[in-house]
Amino acid sequence: MAESTSSGESETEATRELLDTAEARIDDLRAARERREAVEAEIDDAGEDAVVAAADTYRKAVRLLDRYEDSATGTGDFQAYVEFQDKFLGLLEELSDDVPAQDAFEAAAERMDRRRLSEDDFEGARADLEPAADYVDLLDRREAAEEAVSKARRDARLCLRDLDEEIERREETLAFADADLDAPVEELREPIRAYNDAVTEEFDEFYESAAAADVVGLLERAESFPLVEFRSPPRDLREFARESPDADEPIPTLLEYADYSGSKLDHYAEDPALLQTTVAVHRTFLERLSAEPLTVELPPPAAESLRLWAREATSVLGRFASEETVARLRGVRDLTRRDDYEDLRFVARAHEELDAEARERVNSGAAAAELDRLRDARERLESTLHGEAEPGDEPRV
């Protein structure tokens, strides 16, 4: 694994990337808050109500200019002209004296208070109002700043989650360093591998030779046992298995038939159209069926989890497996009653997790140093997320 050096200690590339991401999230959150605070300070200086009033009046005035420009100019619609002047001048006259950009609104009102209006007057009024547009921009900037803070918070929380997961993994790695790697883990592995091999072989034989209806029936049966995680068959595939005489054929045969031309398929299938519209559509689902949901992972699960799973798996195995294979599963289940099951499971996990490089990092202290830096980054990120003051707020080198 590629490594870099920081603060005199070696770091894995993954750790460096996560630490850099945490620093970036801290910087992003601080910067977003600073931008929001700066905008809010501008609004506070002018007064919240006054800024909102100026922005709202500007928007309404521009909408009126856009709406009436064609009808209220020249010698056009006199009624539109009267209506426009009444609304436009009335809007601006209602403004209180403390609304900012007062000169802009007064200039626009004076320009439009005349007997005849031209397109140039409308354009001039828009120009008069431009200073008031700054207050619309100010509110827009505040909204954008608030969105930026929200996004920075979300990103920070996601980074905290990643840090938590990595810290937990590193804590486990350090705990594995105390495992007795000479413990007899084969006493767990061998029965599990023997069962996995047997159930895989028998499921493959069942898949290859049993009627498709029986295989779909097995999947429907497995739905009653949620710990055995077979995917549920699609509804039209269930109907095909129950209703079509072609469902008496094995799945590989049906998949082969689905590739035939219509005229050729007529010689092999009782209902060619249904076979093609059902089997062909669900080819990927059917081809991916395997014994994997009925196998035991290595290292194995915790004792209680394995016992519960084995109880459900035994019920599913009854549809196709031999008594010998069912007995092997019972043997695997009985492993969980050993006094040293969790100890052997822990050692098995240590063998999986600790390669030679990982053991060297543990023994040298590099793994513990990385864990300390990850914890420190998490603490700083959480502190920043909650808006708390941090001692020594300088960035990590």
Image (cartoon, rainbow, N blue to C red):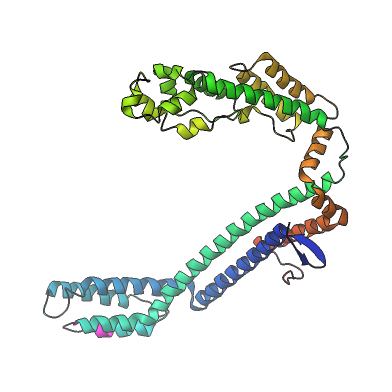
Instruction: Please name the residue shown 71% across and 67% down the image.
Output: 389
Q: Quadrant of the C terminus?
A: bottom right
The overriding secondary structure of the stretch rendered in magenta is loop
| Residue 230 higher or lower than 73, as above or below | above
Q: Quadrant of residue 57?
A: bottom left
Q: Quadrant of the N terminus?
A: bottom right
Instruction: Please name the residue shown 20% across and 84% down the image.
Output: 114
Left or right, 169 with reference to 158? right
Along the viewing direction, whichever of 383 and 87 lies nearer the viewer: 383
Along the viewing direction, whichever of 382 and 356 lies nearer the viewer: 356
Q: How many marks?
A: 0
Instruction: Please name the residue shown 63% across and 18% down the image.
Output: 321
Left or right, 209 with reference to 96? right
| Residue 211 higher or lower than 159, as above or below | above
Residue 291 screen position, x and y as percent: 61, 28
Is residue 293 something one can see in this rendering? Answer: yes
What span is in magenta? 110-118
Residue 110 screen position, x and y as percent: 27, 85
